[in-house]
Amino acid sequence: MSTGRSPGVSPVDAALKSAARMPKASNRHTNAKPTMQPSRDLESWVRHLSRADIPVLRTTARELARLRDQTPEQLDPRHVAQVLARDPMMTVKLLRHLQTHRFHGRRVDVVHVEQALMMLGMDPFFASVPADPLVEDMLAAHGAALLAMLRVVRRAQRASSWAMDWAARRQDVHFDEIRIAALLHDLSEMLMWCFEPERMLAVRARQDQDRTLRSRDVQQAIFGFSLPELQRALARDWALPELLLKLMDDESRGQDRVRNVALAVDLARHSAQGWNDAALPDDFREIAEFLRIKPEAVPALVGAQAIETAPPPQA
């Protein structure tokens, strides 16, 4: 079982460092035509993203290609599931495919990735859920957006690891459901970095100018909807498991399992730039209350001194 420390995310860390070192030429396209027309509303975005091929991380594509070359006897769904556990985009790509293709009269939602892989089969998985296009290729002309996108992925990885560990500590036998909910909690943010990088940069710039602005208010002003609204609409359109929708609903954080996910997501967000954020003491107190431990024990539990922050984006 996890020790509560952040998972090994060296491939994403390496990608972050690479993105931060990208030459300035990769960021020249600030006046490029937006991915979609300005008049797009929430329903239009849902239709567009439902038709779109979701991009995945380059490291995911490489690992899956290596596994696919193994013999049928060697290929283990557990190993494939471990690769998907580090990539929220590939995870939702699998779940979306499974939910929109109800095989053999299946009526029960599937939340566990390994179960989904076994139900689908390895050959159909590789054929029907390809590991492309790549995030890094899609954002090759938007270095700042790529860096931001990878940081969101790293946040999701940390949140999923912490959420799973805390669920296990509370003897929740279905801790993997908690892990996946935390991994996918900020999926709409990742998608918009990929498909509308310029407007996402505009959101960030406006918040940088005024730290008092709420994220949802800025998103509403620029997109005409908030990212949580987009996420809920996509989840319904993709028929994602109802359990996941409930676990990702921050407004229901009075429920223990939802609170587990929300606390992990909050901690990952507040510690993304280091361990000096003013919100962290409150996070530690809430986590301590949730786990019934002393607040001073929380930093060591979450590996507060062991996590390296990403390099700042270059001007």
Image (cartoon, helix red, strand yellow):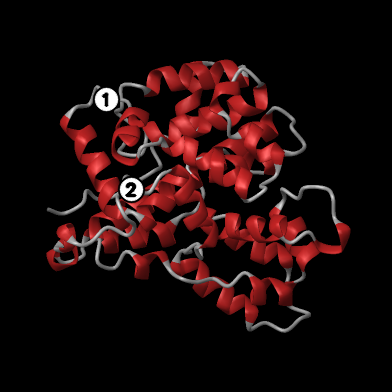
Mark 1 crowd level (few <14, some 14–19, many ≥20, 10 Å Cα): few
Image coordinates for residue 261, horizontal then vertical, percent:
57, 32
Please tell me whether mark 2 sits on a helix, a strand or a loop: loop
Residue 279 in sight here: yes
Q: Residue at x 31, y 27 (%)?
A: 277
Image coordinates for residue 28, horizontal then vertical, percent:
14, 63
Q: Image check: 73 left or right of 126?
A: right
Looking at the picture, does residue 39 appear above or below residue 303? below
Q: Image check: 299 left or right of 171?
A: left
Image coordinates for residue 2, horizontal then vertical, percent:
61, 43
Which quarter of the rendered picture does the N terminus lie within? top right
The residue sitting at the right extreme is: 105
Q: Residue at x 47, y 36 (%)?
A: 228
Q: Image check: 233 left or right of 257?
A: left
**Res 172 quadrant in image:** top right
Badge 2 is on which residue? 39
Badge 1 is on which residue? 213
Looking at the picture, does residue 191 appear above or below residue 302? below
Q: Which one is in front, 118 or 8? A: 118
Q: Nearer the viewer, mark 2 or mark 1?
A: 2
Mark 2 crowd level (few <14, some 14–19, many ≥20, 10 Å Cα): few
Image coordinates for residue 14, horizontal then vertical, percent:
35, 62
The amino acid marked with disc number 2 is Ser
Is disc 2 in contact with disc 1, using a CB cutoff of under 8 Å? no
The residues bearing labels 2 and 1 have C-alpha atoms spaced at a distance of: 24 Å
Looking at the picture, does residue 219 appear above or below residue 96? above
Please tell me whether mark 1 sits on a helix, a strand or a loop: loop
Q: Residue at x 55, y 41 (%)?
A: 233
The amino acid marked with disc number 1 is Leu
Q: Earlier in the sequence, mark 2 or mark 1?
A: 2
Q: Image check: 158 left or right of 258?
A: left
